[in-house]
Image: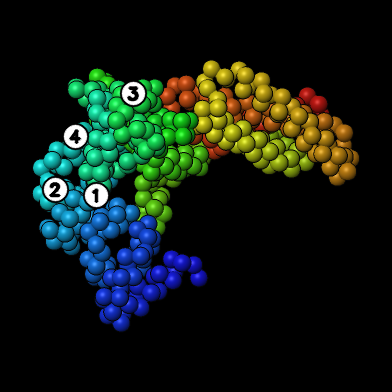
Amino acid sequence: MDNKELELEKVIELIESKKISELRKFLENVNSADFPTILENIDDEKIIMVYRLLPKQKAAEVFVELDHDDQEKLISCLKDIEIKNVMNEIYMDDAVDFIEEMPANIVKRILANTTKENRKIINELLKYPEDTAGSLMTTEFIDLKGNINVEKAFEIIKKSGIQKETVYNCYVLSKDRKLIGVIDIKDLLIAEKTTLIKDIMDTNIIKAYTLEDQEEVTKMFEKYDAVAIPVVDKEERLVGIITIDDAVDVMKEEVLEDFEKMAAISPTDESYFKTSVFEHAKKRIVWLLILMLSAAITGTVMAKFETSIAVMPVLVVFIPMLMDTGGNAGSQSSTLIIRGLAMDEINTKDIFKTMWKELRVSLLVGIVLGLVNGIRIMIQYQSFEIAVTVNITLIGVVIMAKLLGCILPILAKKIKLDPAIMAAPLITTIVDTFCVLLYFSLSQLILNI
């Protein structure tokens, strides 16, 4: 039994035995990230009771960890003063995240119990388009002036740092709030108290712009090993920062979205069990219909070779193997290319370089597969002509599949589409048609049928 299960058992035991004071002490030591597992396994009535036992700051931390349905449920049950406590403790970027998902009546109640200053910040953040740096950032950061000394800087950090999302990086602003430098807390700690901030700040600033795509911003975290990245507007004024925890959440969302697209499923924001059967079907059926109808082309091609099949029925035996091998070969290439594009290892200008590499790989792979398959056919069917026909087709299909696997994702990126949509299902459908056409054309030529 793992730690989460033990915590859940303990909470249930304390609730049932009505040991409220002991339960309050126990909950204080439970990690905020573990609360969703505990709350989803107890009754709604008990969820409210457990939540009300938490200290204000912990309650805000737990609220952020919950999914949107549980947040809505809590807001509906909490008193106005309790909502106000949550909104006073929560970071504004987290507040915007859950407000965006709430019904209008719930949003109205939340904003009614939010300070005027925080309402202004929330409304400002909500103006930025979804999936941009502006929609992802928080406005809780420490800003300093360049003409103050280190001692004064620490006074500012001690006074306001507790309310900020991070104190590891401080941002140096000019009088008109333009970002002119960044200073690390480590540099402040080792500097003399009388040293001016402008003399030790880093002016080589890694920054993002409010309308920049959030996926591009997350790549900056990986490239520069950043803990936080400042966000500026088009006038270079600092308006917020994006912290590593928010960047990790975006990375996770992007990976899940790409995974769904590669499986020919329309992306969804809800978890598997919280998505209804109807929604699951709706997300899957469109691509399945497209792939099913496109696969009919393969059947049409095969119908044109009925005479060849009638003369030599054994040819049909090799079709599944050829199609599966082609599909798998294309899937391998597309997966690697999509990964390379996501990691910025491959650029759209590298298309010919990538094709040349995949061509050489496919030749090596095709020849090895052909040799193994040729030996099998000779042993099983004792037909050199069939072995030659199947193996030439096999090599051709592998080459075609791997080239498609590298070309299509790069072309998608070039025309501003998500490369993940050019994944295995689509490539397999194209390869299947090519496979049948090549196979029966070679059969007629080599086998004289």
Residue on which disc 2 sits: 114
Q: Amino acid at mark 1?
A: Ile
Q: For mark 1, does the 10 Å Cα neighbourhood hold few (<14), some (14 to 19), or many (20 or more) residues?
A: many
- The tag earlier along the polypeptide, 2 or 3, is 2
Task: Report the disc number at residue 199.
Answer: 3
* Residue at the image position 37 percent from the left and 60 percent from the top: 31
Q: Amino acid at mark 4?
A: Glu
- The tag earlier along the polypeptide, 4 or 1, is 1
Task: Report the disc number at residue 90.
Answer: 1
Residue 44 to residue 59: above or below: below
Disc 3 versus disc 1: distance between alpha carbons? 35 Å
Disc 3 versus disc 4: distance between alpha carbons? 33 Å
Q: Amino acid at mark 3?
A: Asp
Does residue 382 appear to the left or right of 73 in the view shown? right
Task: Report the disc number at residue 124.
Answer: 4
Q: Position of residue 424 (x, y in %)?
A: 56, 37
Q: For mark 2, does the 10 Å Cα neighbourhood hold few (<14), some (14 to 19), or many (20 or more) residues?
A: some
* Residue at the image position 87 percent from the left and 33 percent from the top: 384
